[in-house]
Amino acid sequence: MSRTIIVSNRLPTKAHRTAEGLHFTPSEGGLATGLGSIYKADDNIWVGWPGLEIADPAEQEAVTAELKADSMAPVFLTQDEIRDFYEGFSNETLWPTFHYFSQHAVYEQTYWEAYVSVNEKFCQAVLALAGPEDTIWVHDYQLLLLPQLLRAARPESSIGFFLHIPFPSHELIRVLPWRRELLEGMLGADLIGFHTYGYMRHFLSSVAQLLGCPSQNGLIEAGQRSVLVDAFPMGIDYDKYAQVAESEEARESEQLYRDALNDARVILSIDRLDYTKGIAERLRAYEQMLRLYPEWRERVTLLMLVVPSRDQVEKYRALKVEIDELVGRINADYRTIGWTPIQYFYRSFPLEHLSGLYRLAEVALVTPMRDGMNLVAKEFIASKGNLPGVLILSERAGAARELSDAIIINPTDTRQLAEAMHEALVMPEDEQRQRMSQMQALVKEYSVYHWVKLFMDRLAYIKIKQQTLATD
Ligand code: GDG
């Protein structure tokens, strides 16, 4: 029987070390919940790193047994691999380059070597589990070499690859010293998926310009093989978010915040700590809004959650300091005895709590500089039910291609963003509801389940098509 093997850098569960030993909690994020629908079905397996160094062989064995019971297979990374492959090449080379922050990118041969060897390590882990009939679905920028490594070992296998971050213009890709190896690595897949047609076009042009591989209608001629490239905008588990928002816990936490904020209007901002998310720019725009429209002082609060992320990487530490200082200064300049302009939390919240905040907020600010998709925008919409609310969305988030009923802004245009906040706060309720229900219909229909099915159907289609092309 054929199975699906999902491979991503992180498993959908995270290991934590406490005085009592290791324990596991679910990872945050859409990938884990979305693919949860398929990886637990049948004999499917999820291969990935449990998010922590586990060096002791006896402990590794125990963890492997525990995760196996939950259809997961761990890949253990050493401290050096975590530093050079994960923090290094993945997060200091590829992440900034693919998000148009080339000025932050580090080009370091030892990082590259670790990236190659960890991709090989993942390859061995997958080969140990996957039979020739199994479908292998590789995820994201940490594993760009894996499709080709698997292809070399299993020429006939069904291999899919999905990139969760933007694919930038070939002008950025060509800057990378290892651009050829990275593109060839991806081309080992039968199907390569992106969130938007824009990313897909950039990929096709990189492959044409840098590898000389032509394509037609998304079908690339890569040597003897045909590789299909397509756009699959990722969705969320709509019903889950809609249900949690109706729960007792979500309503309680909504009320708790409403009372504590003295019924002020709430603008919500939720992100992982990342320079791509436009957090500092958003704060400056909020300050400008308070300056331009002083009538909102004492009547509106910016509720800002920043989830700690990659805090071993220097750029992230510097960003944290910048945000701390900006929040401190804006609060000091504008606060009154009964009002704090920005309520800032640097931590992760449980889902029910998050859901309460989605319910509470009248305006959600999703204003990244660059973002593959952005699931927070979709979660806000799914959580709103019949409540009004306005989404302010950056034109540089993948989600902007679908959510045209949001107020779409350019995140570097501080003035435009400040005006958009005011516009959102004064938008008539009828208009809010109309825009919201249109976005809800779309997010509900194109859920994560739909996304998985579409990808799997296309992968099955290209395998059949390859056979007909080969016999023609
Ligand atoms: C990458 C791409 C693409 C956040 N804070 C808490 C929490 N979250 C959850 C959100 C959401 C997820 O984390 C963040 O997803 P995003 O899509 O917004 O962003 P990335 O983490 O950068 O994800 C992105 C995505 O992959 C999928 O392809 O959309 O563009 O960068 O689900 O709800 N969850 C909990 N507590 C928090 O405090 N429980």
Image (cartoon, helix red, strand yellow):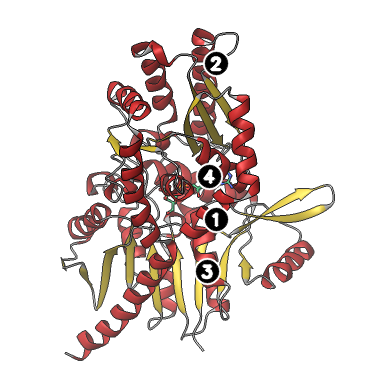
- The CA span between labels 3 and 2 is 43 Å
Identify the residue position indicated by label 2 in the image: 328
Q: Residues within 10 Å of mark 4 (few under 14, many from 20)?
A: many
Q: Which is in the foreground here, disc 3 or disc 2?
A: 3
Q: Which is in the foreground here, disc 1 or disc 2?
A: 1
Identify the secondary structure beneath mark 4: helix
Seen in the image, is 384 located left or right of residue 66?
left
Identify the secondary structure beneath mark 3: helix
Q: Which is in the foreground here, disc 1 or disc 4?
A: 1
Percent across and percent down for residue 22 are 77, 55
State whether label 3 is within 8 Å of ligand 1.
Answer: no
Upstream in sequence: badge 1 or badge 2: 1
Q: Which mark is residue 87?
A: 4
Q: Which is in the foreground here, disc 4 or disc 3?
A: 3
Instruction: Please say if the residues under marks 1 and 4 sit with CB atoms less than 8 Å apart.
Output: no
Instruction: Please say if the residues under marks 3 and 1 sit with CB atoms less than 8 Å apart.
Output: no
Type of amino acid under label 3: Ser
- Residue 154's quadrant in the figure? bottom left
Q: Nearer the viewer, residue 233 or 472?
A: 233
Seen in the image, is 57 located left or right of residue 383?
right
Percent across and percent down for residue 76 are 64, 60
Identify the secondary structure beneath mark 2: helix
Q: Which mark is residue 37?
A: 3
Q: Residues within 10 Å of mark 1 (few under 14, many from 20)?
A: some
Q: Nearer the viewer, residue 269 or 321?
A: 269
- The CA span between labels 1 and 2 is 36 Å
Type of amino acid under label 4: Glu
Q: Which is in the foreground here, disc 2 or disc 4?
A: 2
- The CA span between labels 2 and 4 is 29 Å
